[in-house]
Amino acid sequence: MNQNMISFLIGIVGATFTLGAYSQTWMTPTQSITTGLVTLMFGLLVREGFISL
């Protein structure tokens, strides 16, 4: 897989955590939003080439 596809998939996971913050019960909404935003930032760093997978 190329770097763009990996970062896209990481972004999808982060968006899912962020958007699902209020509809799931195994994490608090704050934890879910924080996890989603950190995952989105990780995807951005992969996309920009700062982190290589």
Image (cartoon, helix red, strand yellow):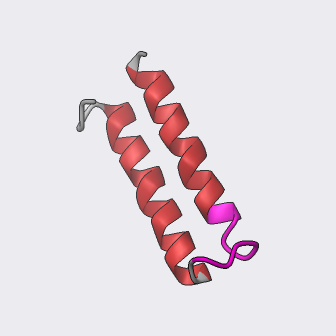
Q: Residue at x 72, y 76 (%)?
A: 22
Residue 26's quadrant in the figure?
Answer: bottom right
Residue 12 place in picture, x, y as percent: 60, 43
Residue 52's quadrant in the figure?
Answer: top left
Q: Quadrant of the C terminus?
A: top left
Residue 33 place in picture, x, y as percent: 56, 71
Q: Residue at x 41, y 53 (%)?
A: 41
24 relative to 42, above or below: below
52 falls in the magenta region: no
Looking at the rendered structure, the number of numbered marks drawn on it comes to: 0
The boundaries of the magenta stretch are 18-26
List the single residue furthest toward the top: 1
* Residue 8 left/right relative to 46: right
Residue 3 place in picture, x, y as percent: 39, 22
Q: Residue at x 54, y 82 (%)?
A: 30
**Front-lying residue, 34 or 23:** 23
**Front-lying residue, 36 or 47:** 36
44 relative to 36, above or below: above
The rendered magenta stretch, by its main secondary structure, is classed as loop
18 relative to 53, above or below: below
* Residue 44 left/right relative to 20: left
